[in-house]
Image (cartoon, grey):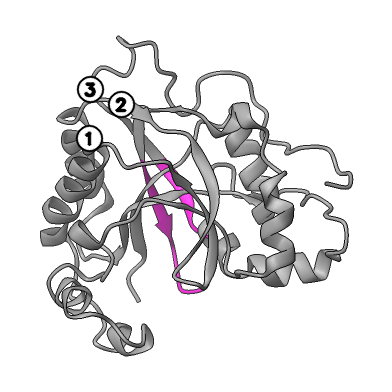
């Protein structure tokens, strides 16, 4: 089966947000290695891993173009993404907060979605679709009940939550467990939650089914350097994750 690619927003490796998010998920999507999870009072390690679930497989990220299969060479995909990124301007992502989405999972969401974010998502979804293979017809069935608009998106773009249905978020756990949500409210220090520079997009790869996603390239947006925004990979290496200890 063909590998899957995705376009994500992945915070810079040296940022506190990336360090804490990767620790929570137990894996660095940039380094492809395990990270030491935090300790939450009343949530045993095995329980935390179960609540995080498949979010660990995808790594700490915000989706811009959902995973897709393609028969095109990787060089072509990367080249197209480089062009698209260079045609979009860097911007500031508003402050993030912990929220439960669709009553099913926990994520960080911005206070609002600035127009440049929605424009970038639309540009990526519509421009990369010609490179993708047609989605598996069973994908829609596995997603359960979709609205008319979501079903149309699934058919046209291979994913239901795009364009008018798009909602930017960085997944923290595949669960809406109340105890975990409460713990996460105090897990991220305010300075780590932004506002944040949105200066690049990341191309990620899943080599085979069930394998973890891994960042294989970062592509800067126009003006990232000029406005003083660090790009992924800038700054000190802080990927070891936070020290263990009760949170």
Residue that label 1 marks? 116
In this picture, residue 143 sits left or right of residue 240: left
In this picture, residue 140 sits left or right of residue 131: right
Query: Which x, y percent locates residue 147?
Result: 23, 80
- Marked residue nearer the N-terminal end (2 or 3): 2
Confirm or deny contact between disc 3 and disc 1 (CB under 8 A): no
Task: Residue at 60%, 70% (x, y): give it.
Answer: 175
Residue that label 2 marks? 91
- Marked residue nearer the N-terminal end (3 or 1): 1
**Which of the labelled discs sits on residue 128, or is there none?**
none
Confirm or deny contact between disc 1 and disc 2 (CB under 8 A): yes
Query: Which x, y percent locates residue 44?
Result: 86, 66
Residue 180 in view: yes
Q: Nearer the viewer, residue 243 or 162?
A: 162
Query: Which x, y percent locates residue 25?
Result: 65, 55
> Which segment is the magenta one?
202-216
Residue that label 3 marks? 222
């Amino acid at each position: 089966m063909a590998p899957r690619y995705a376009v994500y927003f992945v915070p810079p490796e040296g940022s506190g947000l990336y360090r804490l998010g990767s620790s929570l998920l137990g894996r660095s999507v940039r380094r492809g290695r395990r990270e030491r999870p935090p300790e939450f009072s009343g949530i045993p390690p095995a329980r935390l891993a179960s609540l995080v679930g498949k979010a660990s497989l995808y790594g700490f990220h915000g989706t811009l173009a959902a995973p897709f299969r393609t028969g095109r060479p990787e060089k072509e995909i990367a080249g197209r993404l480089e062009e698209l990124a260079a045609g979009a301007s860097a911007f500031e992502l508003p402050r993030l907060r912990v929220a439960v989405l669709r009553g099913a999972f926990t994520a960080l969401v911005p206070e609002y979605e600035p127009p440049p974010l929605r424009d970038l998502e639309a540009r990526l979804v519509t421009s990369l679709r010609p490179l993708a293979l047609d989605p598996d017809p069973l994908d829609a069935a596995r997603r359960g009940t979709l609205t008319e608009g979501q079903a149309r998106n699934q058919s046209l773009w291979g994913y239901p939550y795009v364009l008018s249905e798009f909602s930017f978020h960085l997944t923290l756990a595949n669960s809406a467990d109340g105890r975990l949500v409460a713990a996460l409210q105090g897990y991220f220090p305010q300075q780590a939650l932004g506002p944040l520079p949105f200066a690049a997009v990341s191309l990620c790869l899943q080599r085979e089914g069930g394998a973890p996603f891994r960042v294989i390239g970062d592509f800067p947006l126009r003006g990232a350097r000029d406005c003083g925004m660090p790009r992924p990979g800038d700054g000190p290496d802080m990927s070891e994750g936070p020290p263990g200890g009760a949170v």
